[in-house]
């Protein structure tokens, strides 16, 4: 049964299949582009908190007490040392003492653009007060 209608239907099927394949590929590619395959969006920098600000401006041996959203109310902050990281960045190590017996080591490093960035904090049990 080779009618003009049957012939037209057979010619449309491959063409429709190609269009469907292209549409599916485009549909699957767009979400991937939004997930990081395109340009990285610029993040707005957040200003340093009280603990970070004190450590940036202070030298080893200096201590203060601040209220900080990240660390708590009335925390004691001391800058312990200045050092150069393995990446060649200028860094400062300090101690944040919250309460009477819990202390946390904090490290800030200055990147190539001059921004001070706090190293990721390690959560868990603090060290005892010296």
Image: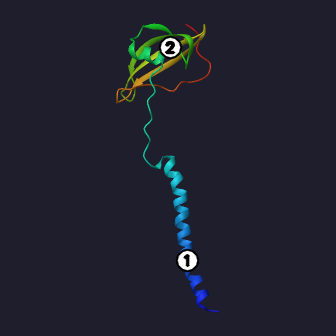
Give the secondary structure at mark 2.
strand
- Per the image, the residue denoted by label 2 is 95
* Residue under the image location 53 percent in, 70 percent down: 19
Percent position of residue 86, x then y: 39, 28
Observer-nearest of 5 and 78:
5
Pointer 2 local density, CA inside 10 Å: few below 14, some 14–19, many at least 20: some
Tell me whether circle 1 and circle 2 mark residues in contact (CB < 8 Å).
no
Percent position of residue 129, x then y: 57, 8
Give the numbered dot on residue 90.
none
- Per the image, the residue denoted by label 1 is 14
Residue found at the far right of this picture: 1
Observer-nearest of 72 and 3:
3
Instruction: Kindly indicate the quadrant of the structure image that contains residue 92.
Output: top left
Give the secondary structure at mark 1.
helix
Identify the coloring: rainbow
Percent position of residue 41, x then y: 44, 41
Labels 1 and 2: the sequence-earlier one: 1
The quarter of the picture where the C terminus appears is: top right
């Amino acid at each position: 049964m080779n009618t003009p209608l049957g012939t037209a239907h057979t010619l449309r099927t491959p063409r429709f299949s190609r269009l469907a394949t292209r549409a599916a590929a485009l549909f699957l590619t767009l979400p991937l582009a939004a997930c990081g395959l395109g340009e990285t969006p610029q993040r707005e920098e957040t200003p340093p908190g009280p603990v970070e600000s004190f450590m940036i401006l202070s030298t080893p041996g200096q201590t203060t007490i601040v209220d900080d959203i990240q660390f708590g109310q009335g925390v004691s902050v001391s800058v312990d040392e200045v050092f150069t990281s393995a990446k060649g960045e200028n860094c400062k190590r300090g101690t944040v003492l919250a309460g009477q017996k819990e202390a946390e080591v904090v490290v800030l490093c200055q990147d190539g653009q001059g921004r001070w960035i706090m190293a990721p904090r390690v959560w868990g049990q603090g060290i005892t007060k010296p």
